[in-house]
Amino acid sequence: MSQRPNAYDVAKLAGVSQTTVSRVLNDFPYVRPTTKMKVLNAIEELGFRPDEIARSLVKKKTNTIGLIVGNLANPFYAETAQVILNEASKLNYDVIMMDGDSKNESLSEVLSKLLNRRVDGVIVATVKRREELTVNIVDSTIPILFFNRSMDNLEQANFVIVDDLKGSKIAMQHLIENGHQNIAYITISGYEEYSTYYNRFLGYKQALQDNGIAYNEELVFEADNHNSALDFSMNLLQTNPSTTAIFASTDSIALEVFEAISRCNKKVPEEISIMGFDDINIAGNPYVKLTTISQRKEEMSKLALTNLLALISGESSSPVQIVLEPKLIVRGTTKSAKRIIEDVK
């Protein structure tokens, strides 16, 4: 017998053909239970491990998916990726995770790498609205599903996203119904490139218009780094005391606003209200208690995985297009503007 047992050794010990061993390994139906037991006992006795690469060539399936995420320093990506990894493991799928925000590679290059590694499908969590893809994602030989973000003018694409525009309007309506009129908005630099940030900004503007509040560009800021968001917030608090609320396009930016308010020796929500978006784990921390819009990230993550696997197995037909309803989570960082003004007086 060779040093490493193979299918021939298993067949010889079990007293069956190699074809029968292959059928047992691949869960082929119509194998007699007694025969199957002989093969399984031989496998255990020999310590045989099937060659997964060879099996994948036969089955034309690797039980591996690709996951393209943004910067994992962003808690949203880290938390949703963990859900997908955990759920995939339960279903005996491996996940190859790659950085979609890499400055050295385009999204097309990252996708091509995954296709070359014979993944069964890909979840793309970060993509620009007008991304130039050399990989045809609609006619690809494997299913590709967008998660969190989507592209413009791609009617046949598969996606699972939240209604960001509606979520932003819900957040603004909560603030406006509490009497806030001067509401600042902080987003990221280059927000127009991404569907998430672009639609959240549109929701901010539409909510103002719907409630007869004039848009003031001096209350809107595009932060390109941690310090710029801090500086804008601190300057706003010192030069524009009529501002009673700040709406951050992400919870991570909202946490930076927290720091700015603390540095200015002001209190949340007694002197200013803060609204976030995403509902990352730290938002619910009892010391943070951030009022925010939930993307229902865990449900979104599970839906992305289950629908991709359904496309892979053929149980579902393309396109899969799911838009989740956002949810307002009221915690401890918002307060009536009237009470804020009265407290300041």
Image (tube, rainbow, N blue to C red):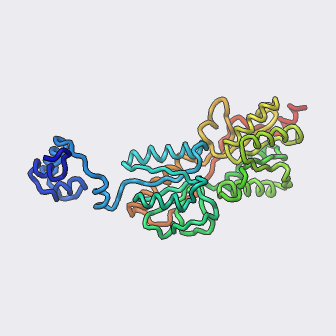
Q: Nearer the viewer, residue 214 or 221?
A: 221
Residue reaching furthest to the right: 345
- Whether residue 140 is visible: yes
* 218 or 182: nearer the viewer: 218
Q: Residue at x 48, y 61 (%)?
A: 112
Q: Residue at x 15, y 45 (%)?
A: 42
Q: Is residue 326 above or below residue 116?
A: above
Q: Quadrant of residue 197?
A: bottom right
Q: With 98 as the anchor, is 57 left or right in this view?
A: left
From the viewer's side, name the closer residue of 201 and 131: 131
Residue 165 appears at what percent x and percent y?
A: 68, 56
- Residue 324 can be seen in this image: no
Residue 196 percent coordinates (x, y): 65, 55
Q: Is residue 324 left or right of residue 344?
A: left
Q: Quadrant of the C terminus?
A: top right
Place of residue 122 in the rendered image (x, y in percent of width and height, measured from the top left): 47, 57
Give the quadrant of residue 288: top right
* Left or right relative to 274: residue 131: left
Q: Residue 296 at x, y = what percent?
A: 57, 47
| Residue at 10% in and 47% down | 13
Q: Count the marks: how many?
A: 0
